[in-house]
């Protein structure tokens, strides 16, 4: 039985991916900070629940090593994380540090635990949920976007390190997704219009954001398509926005996006 290890499995993309892979016959090691939030995941066949807090290096090592000792893991899916939003000068230092300790350092420490395993078996995949905000800069995303760009940089660097060992590296890139994604700090402070326009930009004419179910299907595709591909937008809306950005000169793009947000 193939096995996937997922961080941040208690909600959103992580939760739906847990269900999707289990329904397709995989064993899922579903990790989360608080196991009491597992809900119905505890009754799904082939789902193994384990505690994992990205702010706890000792727990990261313990949970990852326990999993690797018990199972031949095929896929690591780094999905846990959260965001903070606000004018850059308004973001408290302690909150910036906590964000990076969670989204960046925690993700890196988890990934380090799995690399020797994948190198030894000469196969597997490491997927990481980054964000469109880590590719397309947006106002009030100075800290969050920087954290996601750091994750993107990790993914792209490890692509070169691990390709000789037959290991796939890929970034799962959501735009706006209809989940309970946590943004404990969300400061507008004069950017109300830009925030509203940003939401409209990410909706791209749709009434609501795509659900995490679509993202789970994209994760499945990334694991099984056999493609040498790094970036996987996790829904059709994000894919369209990403393609528009990729196909436009960055100096022209910034002016177009500025006009959409502020004019």
Image (cartoon, grey):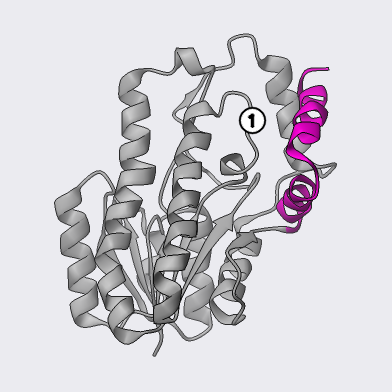
Image vertical order of residue 3 relative to residue 86, above or below? below
Can the viewer see residue 168 in this picture?
Answer: yes
The residue to which callout 1 is attached is 138
- Residue closest to the eye, 30 or 244: 244
User: If the image is split into quadrants, where does the C terminus sit?
Assistant: top right
- Residue closest to the eye, 86 or 113: 113
Residue in the image at 66% along x and 63% along y: 214
Image vertical order of residue 45 relative to residue 60, above or below? below
Q: Quadrant of residue 232?
A: bottom right
Image vertical order of residue 249 relative to residue 164, above or below? above
Horizontal and vertical percent position of residue 181? 51, 42
Chief SS of the magenta region: helix
Stretch in magenta: 236-263
Residue in the image at 44% along x and 83% along y: 26
Horizontal and vertical percent position of residue 109? 27, 54
- Residue closest to the eye, 194 or 119: 119
Residue in the image at 50% along x and 51% along y: 152
Can the viewer see residue 45 in this picture?
Answer: no
Does the stretch in magenta take in 252? yes
Q: Quadrant of residue 4?
A: bottom left
Q: How packed is label 1: few (under 14 Cα within 10 Å), some, or many (20 or more)? A: some
Does the stretch in magenta take in 201? no
User: If the image is split into quadrants, where does the N terminus sit?
Assistant: bottom left
Q: Is residue 226 left or right of residue 56?
A: right
Query: Number of labelled discs?
Result: 1
Secondary element type, mark 1: loop
């Amino acid at each position: 039985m193939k096995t996937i290890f997922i961080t941040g499995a208690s909600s959103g993309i992580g939760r739906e991916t847990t269900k999707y892979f289990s329904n397709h016959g995989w064993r899922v090691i579903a990790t989360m900070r608080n196991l009491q939030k597992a809900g119905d995941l505890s009754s799904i066949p082939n789902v193994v629940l384990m505690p994992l807090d990205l702010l706890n290096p000792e727990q990261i090592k313990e949970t990852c090593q326990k999993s690797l000792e018990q199972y031949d893991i095929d896929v690591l899916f780094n999905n846990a994380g959260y965001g903070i939003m606000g004018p850059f000068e308004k973001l408290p230092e302690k909150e910036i540090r906590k964000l990076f300790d969670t989204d960046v350092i925690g993700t890196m420490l988890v990934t380090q635990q799995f690399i020797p395993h994948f190198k030894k078996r000469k196969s597997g995949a490491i997927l990481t949920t980054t964000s469109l905000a880590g590719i397309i800069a947006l106002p009030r995303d100075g800290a969050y976007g920087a954290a996601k760009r750091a994750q993107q940089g990790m993914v792209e660097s490890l692509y070169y390190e691990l390709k000789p060992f037959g290991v796939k590296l890929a970034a799962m890139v959501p735009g706006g997704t209809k989940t309970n994604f946590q943004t404990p700090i969300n400061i507008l402070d004069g950017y109300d219009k830009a925030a509203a326009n940003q939401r409209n930009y990410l909706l791209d004419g749709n009434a609501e954001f795509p659900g995490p179910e679509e993202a789970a299907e994209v994760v499945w595709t990334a694991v099984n398509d056999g493609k040498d591909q790094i970036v996987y937008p996790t829904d059709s809306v994000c894919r369209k926005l990403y393609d528009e950005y990729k196909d436009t000169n960055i100096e022209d793009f910034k002016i177009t996006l500025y006009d959409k947000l502020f004019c």
